[in-house]
Amino acid sequence: MRNYKQQLIFSASDLVTFVGCRHATVLDRRQLDAPVPVTQDDEYLKLLQEKGLEHERRLRDGLRTEGRQVVEIPQEGALEDRTARTREAMFAGADVIYQGAFISGRWHGYADFLLRVPGESSLGAYHYEPLDTKLAHGAKPKHVIQLGVYADLLTKVQGRAPDRLHILLGTGKTVVLPMRDFQYYLAGAKRRFESFVDDLPQDSVGQPCKACTLCRWRDRCEGEWESANHLSLVARITGGQIEKLNAAGITTVSELGALGAGIRIPGVQPATLERLRGQARLQSLKRQDGEVRYELLATESGRGLERLPRPNAGDLFFDMEGDPLIEGGLEYLFGFVYEEISQAVFKPF
């Protein structure tokens, strides 16, 4: 989100963030009024971005090689200029539009590709459908959300909704999804997002979620959890368990670790609670003196690690390195680790 001509406008990425973590949306909105340092992209994320651009440009060049007319909208310049150029290319009937720009009301976006397809619209006997390139090996909900926002913006220009959304995966496969399957969910998600931003909660606390890995606020949240001795620090605890513990007045790792053995928490199985209590106790003790402690769990014969054969001096351990970002994937540096005169030796092949 950003301030644009004295108005707050939103992007597809903002909606993806909101669906994944509302606390991140709160922090993004506050950032506009009171900027603070954020987590910088690490080298792996930069590599992903670079590979993503390469994937995108390969498709652009491939379409040109096929003889398709690809109109590229310059990425420099004001949003209005880019939007005007996109409209011009659409009304001129370009086969493919690369980096098309849109703004309508409170929403704007930049579509990787717009594909001309048959079908009446305000443009003529054709209309456009959005295509995004992704490194992933399968379509994900966030991809659909992103394309759905582009589809809405596209509809405002051409007077009809696109029938399909296209995703070119990192495997080279193109996934085609019907827009009608997602349009009502997307409309509802956009309404919830706008209402949330317009009435932003004064108090907001982050909860660990799948979005944390790529979130620019992850360092801040982790610092807050550590400072508050938050229950999310307990190994293998779930969000639902945290809610039930909070409802019972238990909000920190220390409080959980100090919980009496006979105490029951509604909605949490006794065996699960005992596991969480024991884990919290070990972590609380380490927090006090820095000493790492552990407890050996009782094992059942023939299950888990008990299924492993007993160690033998002739054991070989296979190792393989791989790079999933290479087109098609690449596995390399096969080898074995084995023991030789009481030392571990790695033998590559």
Image: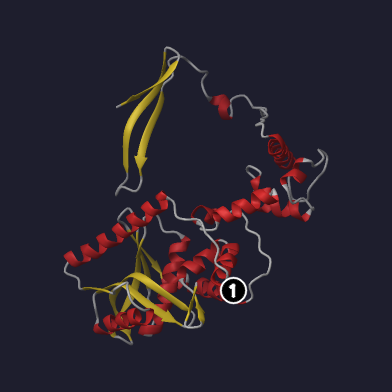
> Residue 322: x and y, percent?
35, 40
Amino acid at the residue labelled 1: Val
> Residue 340: x and y, percent?
40, 14
Left/right of residue 323 with respect to residue 231 in the rendered view? left
> Residue 14: x and y, percent?
50, 68
> Residue 148: x and y, percent?
44, 71
Image quadrant in which you'd find residue 57: bottom left
Residue at image location 25% in from the left, 60% down from the top: 58
Left/right of residue 180 with respect to residue 91 in the rendered view? right
Asked if residue 161 shows in the view, the reply is no
Q: Which residue is mark 1?
A: 197
Question: Mark 1, residues whose alpha carbon is within 10 Å: few (<14), some, or many (≥20)?
Answer: some
Residue at image location 77% in from the left, 56% down from the top: 247
Task: Reply above or below: 227 against 288.
Answer: below
Identify which residue, 160 or 192, lies in the foreground: 192
Task: Reply above or below: 84 against 170.
Answer: below
Quarter of the image that includes the C terminus:
top left
Task: Reply above or below: 294 against 114.
Answer: above
Asked if residue 219 shows in the view, the reply is yes
